[in-house]
Image: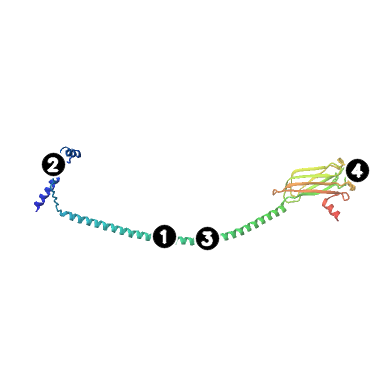
Amino acid sequence: MRRALLLSLAAVLFAQSQPPPPSPRKDTKSEQKNSDPQKQQVRPENNQPPPNSITVYQYNPQSDNGDKGQAEAENKERASIERVNATSTQLLAFFTFLLAIATAALCVVAVLQLITMKQHKTEFEAIATTMSSGLTETTKAANAAKKSADVSEMALKLTQSADVILDAISIIDRNRQTRPVAADSYVSTVFKNHGRTRASNVVYTVIIDIPGVPASDRSNGPSILGAGDTQTLAFIEFGEFLTGSVSQEINTGSIIMRVTGRVSFTDVFGDAHESTITCRYDAKRFVFRSEESWENEAQG
């Protein structure tokens, strides 16, 4: 049996190893047909079909075993892939479940944060309201304190500030005796600081006003005048700028003589002050009276 198989295999191999007969060229075949048709008729054996070839198949028992092994390998590979897919699907489902739990936890945390923020908002609004009320009360207290301080400062200035005013005005002679208008008499003014602190930058300006006569003025300063101190400003004697007839008319009241002026100063608090002087001579009493006094007497 083995020998028969070997012989058949050898014959097949030998038949396959023989080279195929060369194929004639198309041009050559056509030339042969055209040139020598008689030869084709003479040799009919050349047109006979070739003998039938015999194909021998050798049975190989190992091919069935190979197919079975390949099928088993494919089944194993398919089973392995199915196991991996199943495991992957389970893991994906597990992680999806974990992701859902985490998302739910985040939602719960967000809700809790929202509730906490709303509570904080309410608390902050209450704190803001309390602070606003406290600020209002603080502002009121600050304003009251400021008013109290302003009042205290004002009271301090009123009681402690300097106060320079005209303290006395008269017509006197060389012996400082009160006299009517005469050639040897003159106007004397006395300013006094009635305050409790000194006055600085004190400037005095006094003018004698007589109709028909050039004005006579007396100025002094700036100077310092302490608390309770006085400053005297004396004019020249009437005989140096008045005639006897004018002096006589002043003494009879026919001519009105006025004294005007002002005094300015700065107190220790840095505030500036000024007071004015306006008075008229009373020839009957030999004194100067304020214009207000004259008006009150006229109305009375």
Closer to the camera, 269 or 257? 257
Instruction: Determine crowd level at label 2: few under 14, some 14-19, many 20+ residues with C-alpha closer than 10 A.
Output: few
Q: Amino acid at mark 3?
A: Lys
Q: Dividing the picture into quarters, in which one does residue 85 lie? A: bottom left
Q: Are marks 3 and 1 in contact (CB under 8 Å)?
A: no
Instruction: Determine crowd level at label 1: few under 14, some 14-19, many 20+ residues with C-alpha closer than 10 A.
Output: few
The quadrant of the picture occupied by the C terminus is bottom right
Instruction: Determine crowd level at label 4: few under 14, some 14-19, many 20+ residues with C-alpha closer than 10 A.
Output: few
- Number of the front mark, 2 or 3: 2
> Callout 1: helix, strand or loop?
helix
Residue drawn at x 37%, y 59% as measured from the top left: 96
Q: In whole angstroms, how far apart are the C-alphas of marks 3 and 4?
A: 97 Å
Q: Amino acid at mark 4?
A: Ser
Lower position in the chain sequence, tag 3 or tag 1: 1
Q: Which residue is the site of mark 4?
A: 245
> Callout 3: helix, strand or loop?
helix
Is residue 145 rendered to the left or right of residue 220? Answer: left
How far across and down, in percent of the image, does residue 99 sit?
39, 59
Q: In whole angstroms, how far apart are the C-alphas of marks 1 and 2?
A: 99 Å
> Callout 4: helix, strand or loop?
helix
Q: How is the image coloured?
A: rainbow
Lower position in the chain sequence, tag 1 or tag 2: 2
Q: Which residue is the site of mark 2?
A: 41
Lower position in the chain sequence, tag 3 or tag 4: 3
Q: Which residue is the site of mark 1?
A: 103
Q: Which residue is the site of mark 3?
A: 121
Instruction: Determine crowd level at label 3: few under 14, some 14-19, many 20+ residues with C-alpha closer than 10 A.
Output: few
